[in-house]
Image (tube, rainbow, N blue to C red):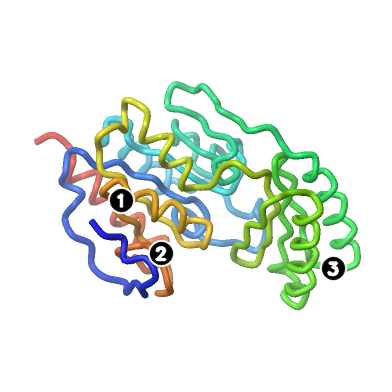
Amino acid sequence: MPSNAGTSTPCLPLPPVCARAGLALFLDLDGVLAPMASTPEAVVADPRRTRVLRALDPALEGRLAVISGRILSEIDRIAGGAARAAAGVHGLHRRRRDGSIHAIPPSAGVAVAIASFHAFAADHPGVIVEDKGVSAGLHYRGAPQAEAAARALAEALAERGGLEVQPGKMVVELKTPGADKGTALLAFMAEPAFAGTMPVMIGDDLTDEAGFRAAGALGGFGILVGAPRQTAARYGLTDVDAVLTWLEAVATEVQPA
């Protein structure tokens, strides 16, 4: 299936792919399974979200993974412990379904970036620094006027420290090179539980585009959540509620008769 890369994706009704026995689902967290919030810690577990994930895992025979920019412990907190397979920090940390973890060690430049971000935040009230060990996030949702300066700082630090710039919604992140959501999806698809199935990546942010492309390359597709934009995703859903409603339908349709 072509990925329609570089085209605008409308919020279209989804085809009944959820009835296919070979479906594998890869889900972003913030903006997809959980609504965006003013601060990272303001996103909390939700009974409906946890219930949906717990229903999907057996329905898909384990072909379910959360792929997020958050660290693994935060994924577990927000998903209510219902995501056995998960990739955190854009794939830099990946937990296989059996619980074993593959982790890329942090670049030395991350510590420098964290210190510089803290100095920046001290001069810009409302800016929040997120230390993920292998990456550093600078959130300016509480100080949107600081966006240009935050991005300029990140670009300079990335060039000096050999880090990758990962822009997001009201955040700029500097991360250790070597992984993204696309490489995480491909790594999961190489595992026995996922191998030979059709991957579907659901995401909302620019960080999810690598996942959309990886899914398309393996015969699957991406689903963009939110307003239409230039994307490699094939289909669209409007918001978190629409995602959860669709996932509930998936869990129901793949259940044994």
Left or right, residue 150 beside residue 21: right
Q: Cβ–Cβ below 8 Å for labels 2 and 3?
A: no
In the picture, the quarter occupied by the N terminus is bottom left
Mark 1–mark 3 Cα distance, whole angstroms, equals 39 Å
In the picture, the quarter occupied by the C terminus is top left
Within 10 Å of disc 1 (Cα), the crowding (few <14, some 14-19, many 20+) is many
Q: Residue at x 17, y 38 (%)?
A: 21
Look at label 2 and name its amino acid.
Val
Q: Nearer the viewer, mark 2 or mark 3?
A: 2
Left or right, residue 244 beside residue 252: right
| Residue 43 picture location, percent across and down | 59, 53
**Residue of label 2:** 225
**Residue of label 1:** 247
| Residue 140 picture location, percent across and down | 72, 67
Earlier along the polypeptide chain: callout 2 or callout 1? 2
Quick one: SS at disc 2?
A: strand
Earlier along the polypeptide chain: callout 1 or callout 3? 3
Q: Residue at x 32, y 53 (%)?
A: 216
Q: Residue at x 46, y 58 (%)?
A: 209
Look at label 3 and name its amino acid.
Pro
**Residue of label 3:** 125
Q: Residue at x 49, y 42 (%)?
A: 79
